[in-house]
């Protein structure tokens, strides 16, 4: 069993230890010591960072009471030799803040709503706790947050101790009931919360700095609450402050008026978009009439509409061709130079031409992408210089 130095002092960053075992496991250099400051991934908490003999520790696991350090490279020390280890304090303190924050949050949930914390997960960016179904709402979240932060500002001491036997502590006192009371490591926030935990915590609640709940979601029969503590909460505040300040500047308004301003802009944009679509439809109808009036000629009972536009996007061409094809006895040959060279062909239901085939012939001769149906098809040409010849080819096929 590896002696866990962090049980007694989570502020210790350097240590010396004897090598108990070393081996290579799936390409990773494993090292087992008689004692360690390194916290292994367990109990919802992620592992520490740091180095042993200046070699970076990349992962730490706990197997059958042993702490296995996985190193980036081999250390020269042999079994029985003394090695020096150093943990990364910034990571450790971050984990202490998050984990202590979790105890405070779970304590507040129990005090206010008699809610048990089922599990805790510490991520690299955010932490979560799962609680059984609670009729949760913003007001309740605010109450929990307020109580948790009050406990921080009161800077209550936090005690860590081992329970040699159950006489020292009744089960009632623990927030979460434990099967076995012997040899439990107890983490007690003075007159607020008491639970069994093997993690790394602060000595005073004040060190947590702040607890911010930043979301909650329903997950089948439980609720997942996510939160940030200490430096993470500060970094989150800085990021959000920068975003809101930027937006307030951009819209030349105060941060408090931002929500109203953005909602108003969004609604205006929706109205404008509706109006634009209606106008677009009107313009297309008008263009259809213009084409029928000025670009249509009759050939043996068939009305041929042909026009090459300078500027017209393919979806507009398609809509125009579609509307014209609703008329009786029409053949439609339309093209546009910009924004891309495109050809759109169509016919009325009562005209016998296979439009798809014509488009396919043009596509093969001039290179391009496209397709469609027997009644309407479109091709986007690779080169603008082919457009006029392709257009002529369509005229020859359909109105020659
Ligand atoms: Zn803990």
Image (tube, rainbow, N blue to C red):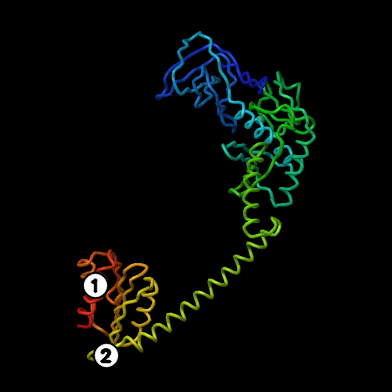
Q: Earlier in the sequence, mark 2 or mark 1?
A: 2
**Which quadrant holds residue 236?**
top right
Q: Quadrant of ligand 1?
A: top right
Badge number at residue 315:
none
Residue 250 image offset from top left, x and y in percent? 62, 57
Residue 246 image offset from top left, x and y in percent? 62, 53
Q: How many marks?
A: 2
- Measure the alpha-carbon separation of dots 2 and 1: 22 Å
**Residue 39 in view here:** yes
Q: Is residue 48 left or right of residue 254?
A: left
Q: Residue at left 19%, top 83%?
A: 400
Q: Residue at left 57%, top 17%?
A: 2
Question: Crowding near pointer 2: few (<14 within 10 Å), some, many (20+)?
Answer: few
Q: Residue at left 28%, top 85%?
A: 304
Task: Out of 95 and 64, give the one closest to the viewer.
Answer: 95
Question: Crowding near pointer 1: few (<14 within 10 Å), some, many (20+)?
Answer: many
Residue 278 image offset from top left, x and y in percent? 50, 78
Badge number at residue 298:
2
Q: Which residue is mark 1?
A: 390
Q: Are marks 2 and 1 in contact (CB under 8 Å)?
A: no
From this view, report whether residue 9 is shown above or below residue 342. above
Q: Secondary structure at mark 2?
A: strand
Q: Quadrant of the N terminus?
A: top right
From this view, report whether residue 318 is shown above or below residue 14. below
Task: Out of 127 and 258, give the one closest to the viewer.
Answer: 258
Mark 2: C-beta under 8 Å from nearest atom of ligand 1: no
């Amino acid at each position: 069993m590896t002696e866990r130095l962090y049980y007694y002092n989570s502020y210790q960053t350097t240590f010396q230890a004897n090598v108990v075992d070393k081996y290579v496991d799936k390409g990773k250099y494993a090292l087992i010591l008689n004692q360690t400051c390194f916290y292994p991934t367990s109990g919802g908490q992620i592992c520490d960072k740091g180095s042993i003999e200046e070699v970076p520790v990349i992962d730490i696991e706990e197997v059958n009471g042993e702490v296995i350090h996985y190193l980036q490279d081999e250390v020269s020390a042999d079994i029985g030799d003394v090695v020096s280890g150093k943990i990364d304090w910034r990571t450790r303190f971050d984990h202490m803040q998050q984990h202590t924050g979790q105890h405070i949050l779970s304590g507040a949930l129990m005090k206010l709503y008699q809610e048990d914390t089922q599990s805790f997960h510490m991520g690299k960016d955010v932490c979560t706790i799962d609680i059984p179904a609670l009729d949760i709402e913003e007001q309740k979240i605010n109450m929990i947050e307020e109580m948790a932060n009050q406990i921080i500002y009161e800077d209550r001491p936090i005690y860590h101790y081992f329970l040699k036997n159950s006489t020292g502590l009744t089960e009632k006192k623990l927030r979460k009931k434990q099967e076995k009371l012997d040899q439990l490591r107890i983490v007690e926030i003075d007159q607020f919360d008491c639970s069994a935990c093997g993690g790394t915590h602060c000595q005073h609640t004040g060190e947590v700095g702040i607890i911010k709940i930043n979301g909650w979601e329903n997950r089948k029969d439980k609720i997942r609450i996510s939160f940030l503590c200490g430096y993470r909460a500060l970094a989150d505040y800085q990021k959000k402050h920068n975003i809101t300040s930027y937006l307030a500047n951009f819209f030349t308004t105060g941060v408090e008026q931002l929500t109203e301003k953005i909602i108003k802009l969004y609604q205006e944009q929706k109205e404008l978009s509706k109006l634009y679509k209606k106008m677009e439809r009107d313009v297309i109808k008008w263009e259809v009439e213009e084409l029928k009036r000025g670009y249509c000629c009759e050939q043996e009972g068939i009305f041929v509409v042909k026009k090459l536009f300078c500027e017209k996007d393919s979806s507009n061409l398609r809509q125009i061709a579609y509307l014209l094809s609703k008329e009786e006895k029409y053949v439609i040959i339309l093209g546009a130079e910009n924004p891309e060279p495109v050809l759109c062909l169509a016919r009325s239901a009562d005209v016998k031409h296979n439009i798809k085939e014509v488009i396919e012939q043009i596509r093969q001769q001039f290179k391009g992408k496209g397709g469609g149906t027997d009644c309407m098809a479109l091709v986007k040409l690779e080169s603008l210089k082919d457009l006029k010849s392709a257009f002529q080819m369509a005229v020859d096929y359909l109105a020659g």
